[in-house]
Amino acid sequence: MKKDFISLLDFTPDELQFIIDQAAQLKNAPRNACDLLKGKSFALIFQKPSNRTRVSFETGIFQMGGNPIYLAPEDINLGKREPTADIARTLSRFVDGIVARVFSHDDLLALSKFATIPVINALSDLSHPCQILADMLTVQEEFGRFKGLRLAYIGDGNNICNSLLIACSRLGVDIAVATPAGYEPSPAYVAAARAAARESGAQVFLTTSAQEAASGAHVLYTDTWVSMGQEEETARRLKDFDGFQIDERLAAKADAKHIFLHCLPAHRGQEVAAAVIDGLHSKIFDEAENRLHAQKAVLKFLYS
Ligand code: CP
Ligand code: NVA
């Protein structure tokens, strides 16, 4: 049966750890996977803009011997030009995998249902699993472990937050999420994280106090307050997130050896102060680089 990479919920803690360890190995020895995708082509469907995800997938597939085919929003016109089911069935006759960045997570599920080839989530409204694997690789590189760490996510309870909840709870990292009231993460993801935490021994904690979440954290994490597709809500969101910026005062509440992560693109002066994102604790470009290694590990996992 074909394997997809659509949600971290579909992977056990051992599988997640295995993919992260593979990513670390591929980072050290990139040539170890250079023929793995030889002769294979991949359709990269993007309904939204991208720098990191597009370039790291195209580069990673190329480095593994495969052929990435970038399809811009107007090329495929998912769900508008023809039914998603027909797109999935057609692409399955041409290529060996679909990497898709979509507005609605349901479109990924529809692609998966009708495709006979693996479907990889390159970001949906609900989750961003590739990003979070790269984040956890960065955490492992910095601290050498997951258990006993505390990650504070401060800001919007969005796709990044949902996937962080699953990765942290499965891998044994305590996670504290601070959002304004009304911007909490998906209840289904919170429930799944709480269930996983009971197994791993991690703690899952939701609050509306950024200070409470940041206190003693080893990892401070934030993301944009206005995700792609929410541009019309910008004015309201900037008002509602007032007080949730990670600035130097908030960062001072974290552990002295904490790191700062952000999936990027970032907005200095909104969700994060320039002094923090450009400061000594920031690991954002190691994190961005790790997208490449983590995704190559996912491809190796799916195609070995
Ligand atoms: N973090 C991330 O997914 O970046 P892009 O939107 O540039 O791909
Ligand atoms: N939450 C952001 C993540 C971008 C990588 C968005 O969906 O736009």
Image: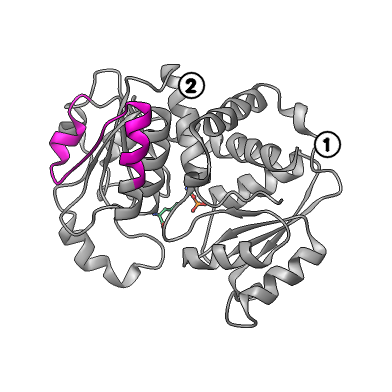
Dot 1 and dot 2 residues touching (CB under 8 Å) = no
Query: From which residue to which does the magenta span run?
Result: 192-216
Q: Categorize mark 1 by other alpha carbons within 10 Å: few (<14), some (14-19), many (20+).
A: few
Which amino acid type is shown beneath numbered disc 1? Asp
Q: Categorize mark 2 by other alpha carbons within 10 Å: few (<14), some (14-19), many (20+).
A: few
In the rendered image, residue 63, in percent from the top left (x then y), is placed at: 75, 39
Measure how far apart labels 1 and 2 are at the Cα level: 26 Å
Task: Kindly identify which residue carries mark 1.
Answer: 35
Quarter of the C terminus within the rendering: top right
Q: Residue at x 62, y 51 (%)?
A: 4
Disc 1, SS: loop
Q: Quadrant of residue 278?
A: top left
Q: Residue at x 84, y 43 (%)?
A: 38
In the rendered image, residue 180, in percent from the top left (x then y), is placed at: 17, 53
Task: Kindly identify which residue carries mark 2.
Answer: 141
Q: In this picture, is 19 found above or below 98? A: above
Disc 2, SS: helix
In the rendered image, residue 34, in percent from the top left (x then y), is placed at: 79, 34
**In the image, residue 207 lies in the stretch drawn in magenta:** yes
Q: Which mark is residue 23?
A: none
**In the image, residue 241 lies in the stretch drawn in magenta:** no
Q: In this picture, is 98 found above or below 197? A: below
Q: In this picture, is 232 found above or below 61? A: below
